[in-house]
Every structure is written in C-alpha cells, then in structure tokens.
C-alpha cells in the first residue's frame, strides 16, 4: 500500500488483555502514601487503563528486535536510545529521522520517527466490567553486605489484581501487509513478555486474545485479506518461516 497520499485502507486489530497476576502500569508519581500510582482515564477516582504508549513501546521493541536479526544493517536505532557515546551498535544503522529520510527502515515506516508519521495508532485499552479495587504491594531494597533492609528504600506500589479485563485496538492506516501481522504476533507474545513495571519481580503477567482484523475503510480495488495472510507476510519478512 501507499503512504498517506491516498486513503486505501484502515484496518483495526482488536484485542483483550486480562491480568493473570499483579500488574503495575504506573504514572511514576505518588500521592504521599504510595510511591507509584496506576494510570487512570482522568482523575484519581476514575477507571484504570492500559495506556496506548505502553502497548506501543512493547510492540515496537519486539518488532525492532526481530527485524534487526532478520535484516542486519537495515534497521535503525532511534538517536535518543543510543548510549552516552552515541555509538550505533553493530548490525544497526543511524536513526532514519537524521540520516535516511528518503529511505526509512521498515520499523520507521510502521511506527514513524521525528520526520514522518507512523501508520500504527495504539489506542488506550479500557476496562471491561466493574471498576476493580486496586491493591498495594510494598518492596524494600536489600543491602548487599548484610542482606538486611536498606534504610530509606521502602517503596509502595499500586497494582491491578488478577482477573481484570481490558479491551483495546491498534488501528493501521494504509499498512503494508506485514505490519498488520507484526502487530498480531507481537500482541500474542504479551503473556511471555509481560507488561508494565517490575516484570522481573513477578509483576506483569497477562493473557491476551487477539480478535479477527476489521476493515474500517477499504478503498476501490483493495483486496480484503485475512488474519492468517497478514501473519504469514510478517513471518516471511522476519524470516520466521
């Protein structure tokens, strides 16, 4: 498909995420009692959400890592993600937004960069059913020498309990076929990757159900394709077949 000169297709990938354990997708801010509060739709008493930015970060990093192995030297590293010495890692190329504006890498074509819009829009995943009562979990850092609690290192985190379901969607405008498949397969990896903060400490376990793709708009001459087709095109590009 083309870029944005013509509107050829708008495709939605709907999905549900259900928490299987404690999940903390935090604001990074506290309220005096808790050090990190979960993200909500509006004020402190409103419903929690899974932010589209959290989902986009997970999907982009997964797609980028897979394609960097399948296409050595063809996938860029965003400038802000480089280390202090600004050295581009072996097998990657310089940020397309700074060096390859006329020939962006596949990841930039899908997600965009500082010079171009992306084709994938990640919407917030909203709560289904009743507003759950959140829980709190407290952590403390340990001193390495005495194996005892370190002073001033107590942290309390607000979390979502197990059994909470959210519905969301990723909307792609004029996508290349592989991009739709990449979203589907990356979302299906969420149970293995986890979501939110402190995944190495037991948080972030979820189950995901990716639904059939939906054509929200289909221009003249655009062939309607199946979920299996999109996944096959992604696996071909990523050399996963």
Image (cartoon, grey):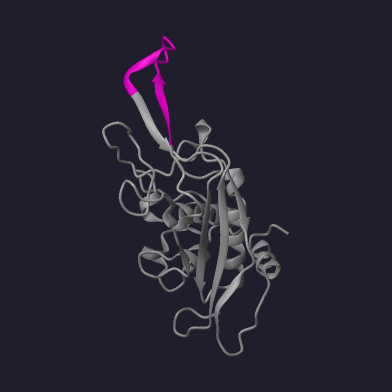
Magenta-span inclusion, residue 152: yes
Instruction: Give the residue displayed 51% in from the left and 53% down from the top.
Output: 129
Residue 1 place in picture, x, y as percent = 56, 79
Magenta-span inclusion, residue 73: no
Residue 62 shows in this picture: yes
As displayed, is residue 44 above or below residue 203? Answer: below
As displayed, is residue 203 above or below residue 124? Answer: above
In the rendered image, the residue lying farthest to the front is 130
**Front-most of residues 158 and 148:** 158
Residue 182 place in picture, x, y as percent = 59, 61
In the image, taking residue 158 as reference, residue 177 lies left or right, namely right
Q: Quadrant of residue 84?
A: top left
Instruction: Give the residue displayed 43% in from the left and 52% down from the top.
Output: 49
Instruction: Give the residue displayed 35% in from the left and 17% down from the top.
Output: 150
In this picture, which residue range is highlighted in magenta? 135-153
Residue 199 place in picture, x, y as percent = 51, 37
Of helix, strand and loop, which mostly describes the magenta segment? strand
**Front-most of residues 94 and 29:** 29
Q: Quadrant of the C terminus?
A: bottom right
In the image, taking residue 82 as reference, residue 17 lies left or right, namely right
Residue 77 shows in this picture: no
Residue 154 place in picture, x, y as percent = 35, 23
In the rendered image, the residue lying farthest to the bottom is 220
Numbered-mark total: 0
In the rendered image, the residue lying farthest to the top is 146
Q: Quadrant of residue 33?
A: top left
């Amino acid at each position: 498909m083309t870029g944005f000169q013509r509107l050829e297709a708008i495709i939605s990938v709907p999905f549900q995420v259900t928490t299987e354990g404690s999940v903390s997708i935090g604001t990074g801010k506290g309220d005096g009692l808790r050090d990190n509060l979960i993200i909500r739709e509006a004020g402190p008493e409103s419903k929690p959400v899974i932010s589209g930015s959290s989902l986009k970060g997970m999907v982009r990093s997964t797609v980028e890592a897979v394609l960097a192995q399948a296409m050595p030297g063809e996938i860029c590293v965003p400038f802000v993600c480089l280390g202090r010495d600004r050295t581009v890692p072996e097998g990657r190329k310089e940020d397309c937004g700074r060096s390859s504006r006329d020939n962006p890498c596949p990841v930039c074509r899908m997600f965009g960069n500082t010079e171009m819009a992306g084709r994938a829009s990640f919407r917030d995943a909203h709560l289904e059913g009743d507003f759950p009562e959140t829980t709190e979990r407290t952590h403390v850092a340990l001193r390495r020498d005495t194996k005892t609690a370190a002073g001033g290192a107590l942290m309390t985190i607000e979390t979502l309990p197990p059994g909470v379901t959210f519905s969301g969607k990723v909307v792609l405008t004029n996508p290349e076929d592989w991009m739709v498949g990449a979203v589907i397969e990356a979302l299906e990896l969420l149970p293995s990757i986890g979501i939110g903060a402190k995944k190495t400490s037991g948080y972030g376990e979820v189950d995901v159900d990716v639904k059939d793709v939906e054509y929200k708009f289909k221009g003249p001459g655009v062939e309607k394709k199946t979920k299996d087709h999109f996944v096959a095109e992604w696996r071909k590009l990523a050399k996963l077949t």
